[in-house]
Image (cartoon, rainbow, N blue to C red):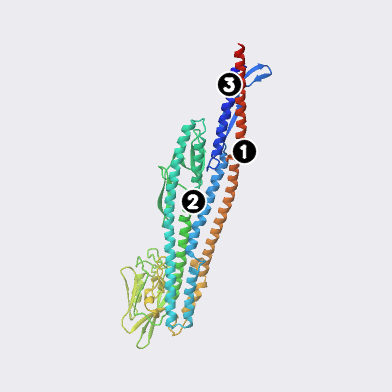
Amino acid sequence: MTLNSALQIGRSGLLTAQTAMEVTGNNLANAATPGYHRNTVALSAVQGQRLSPSAYLGAGVQLDAIKRQTDEALEARIRSSVSDGSHAQTQADLLRQVESIQAEYSSVNLTSSMGKFFDSWSALANNPQDYGKRTSVISESESLSKHIQQMDSELKNLREQTDSAIKQSVITVNDLLKQVELSNKQIALSEQGTGNASALRDQRDQLLGELSKYMEISTVEMPSGSVDVYVGSTPIVMNGEAEHIEMTYEQQDGVSTPVLKVGDDKDILQIQGGQLGALIEYRTVDINEQIATLDQLTHEMIFEVNKIHSQSQGLEGFSTITGTYNVDDTSAALNSPEANMDFVPEHGSFKIHVKDKTTGQMTSTTINIDLDGIGGNDTSLDSLAVELNAINGINASITADGKLQLDTNGSNLEMSFSDDTSGALAALGINTFFSGHGSSNIELNEVIAKNPDFIAAGQGHTPGDNSTALALDALRDQSLDGLNGASIMEFWTDHVQDLAVKISQASSSADASQTVLNSLQAQQQSLSGVNVDEETINLMQYQQAYNASARFISTIQDLMETLLQIA
C-alpha cells in the first residue's frame, strides 16, 4: 500500500464521519419536529488489494446509504387507527347534539311535555265541565305541539349544518389530495428511482395521516416513489395524481341525500371510517332516523287522540264543521293510494247525530264506511258526501281542496258524532283535537283553541260524562300497532335510551381506538423517533472516528515529510 492510498483511507474516514455527524445533527435538530422520521447511515468497508492468498488490505470506509427509519405496515396500522378513532369520536360528538335537542336530562323535555298533556286530561276527567280544566288542556296541548315542532325544526337544522360540514370536509380532502399529488411529483423528481427524499416523505406521510382523519385509506407505493391512495377499491390518487371528489344530492326513499362522487367517471365513493365517514353516516342514517322517529311518534299520537276525540262530544255541538284533512282524489276509495290521505280509515261505521236545540229531540244516523274491497263500491269522499247529504238537517259538500264540509239546515240545529269504528272521522279531520299529520305541523285544532267548549270530554251525550277524558289519559300507556306494540311513552323512552346506548358505544370505541393508537405510536416512536441520548452517543462515536481519521492523516503526512527529507 502506498502512502497516497493511506491518505485516501484517512480521507474516506473523515468524509464518512463528517456525513454521519451531519445526519446525527439533523436528527437532533428535528427531535421535536412533528412527523419526522430519524435517519441512520449505512457504512461498509471498501475492498482493497490482496497482499497474499490469505491477506487483504482494506481501502477505507464508504457510505452506502442514508436510511429513513420507518415501517410501512406500522404506518398503515396507525392511519387505520386514526381513522377509526376519528370516526368514533365524531360520531359520539354528533349524537350528543341530538341528545341536547332531546334534552331528556333537563326539566323541559318531550317526556315531561307529553306527561303534562295526558295529566291535563286526567284533571279534566275529575270535572269535565270546568272551564279552567279545559283551558289547561288547551295550554298543555299547545305547549306539546310547539315543543314537537321545535324539536323537528332543530333536527332539520342539524341536518343542514351536517351538509355544510360534509361540504367543508370534502373541500379539505380535495386540498389534501392535491398536496399529496405535489409531494408525489417532488419525491419522484428528487429520488429519480434511486435516492431517498426523506424530508419530502415525512411531509407526505403527514398529509396521509391528516387524510386518514377524514376517511379510511390504503396506499400503494410505485417504483417512482409516488403513492396511489385508495378508499376501498376506488382510487382517489392514481398514478401519482389526485382525483377530484364532489358532493351531490340524490333522492333516496323520498329524502334528499348527499352522495360523494370521484373522478371524471363520477364513481360513487363509499366512505368508510374517519370524520367524513361519520358525517355521512350521521347525515344519511342517524339524523333521518331521529326525524322519522319523532314524526312516527307524533303521527300516531295525532291519529290515536283524534280517533278518540272525533267520536266524542263537547259541551256544545256544531252548526258547521270543515275537515282538517284533504283527499287528493275524491272519487277514489278512502283507503286507496289515489286518495292519498294522511291517515287511512278502515272498514267500519260511525254515527252522526242531529239535535234540535229548541226541543232537545235528537236523530241519529249510522254511516257505513265500506272499505272491504269487495263489490267495487268502496266508500269515497264523493259517495260519503252524498250519503251525509241525504240526512235531514245536514248539508254535506266538498271544498275545492278536497275537504269534507258539513252544515246544519237551521240555526236551531246542531250536530255531533259517536261510535266510529272506521277512523274515518279522524282521517277526515271531523271533530278532531289535533290538526297536522306529523312533527313538522302538529297543532291544536283552531276550532278548539278558540272555544274550549268544543273539547270532547265524554260520550253518550250525557252531561258530566268523562269517558273520553279518561280514555285519553289512558292512551299514554296503551300499546299501539303503529308504534310496534309500544305505548306512546314507552316508544319515546326506548328511543331516548337507544340514543344513549349509541353514544356510550361510540365513546367507548373512541377510547379503545385511542388506546390502540397510543400503543402503535409508541412503537413508531421507538423505531422512527429521535432519542436524544442515543443520538448524542452516536455523535460522540462519529466525532471520535473523525478525530482518529484526522490523526491518521497527520501521521501519514509526517511519514511523507520524512521520506522527502531522506530523498
Percent coordinates x, y for residue 205 in the rendering: 51, 41
Q: Which residue is mark 2?
A: 275
Q: Earlier in the sequence, mark 3 or mark 2?
A: 3
Q: Residue at x 49, y 41 (%)?
A: 229
**Mark 1 to mark 2 CA distance (whole Å):** 38 Å
* Residue that mark 1 sits on: 534
Q: Is residue 13 left or right of residue 224?
A: right
Whole-angstrom CA distance, mark 3 to mark 2, is 58 Å
- To which quarter of the image does residue 48 belong? top right
Amino acid type of the residue tagged 2 in the rendering: Gln
> Whole-percent x and y of residue 302?
44, 70
Vertical comparison of 453 with 210: above or below: below
Give the residue at the far bottom of this rendering: 359
Given residues 169 and 369, the one toward you in this image is: 169
Q: Residues within 10 Å of mark 3 (few under 14, many from 20)?
A: some
Q: Camera-side residue: 154 or 489?
A: 154
Q: Is residue 418 visible?
A: no
The earlier-in-sequence mark between 3 and 1 is 3
Task: Judge whether residue 511 can be spotted in this image.
Answer: yes
Q: Identify the secondary structure beneath mark 2.
A: helix
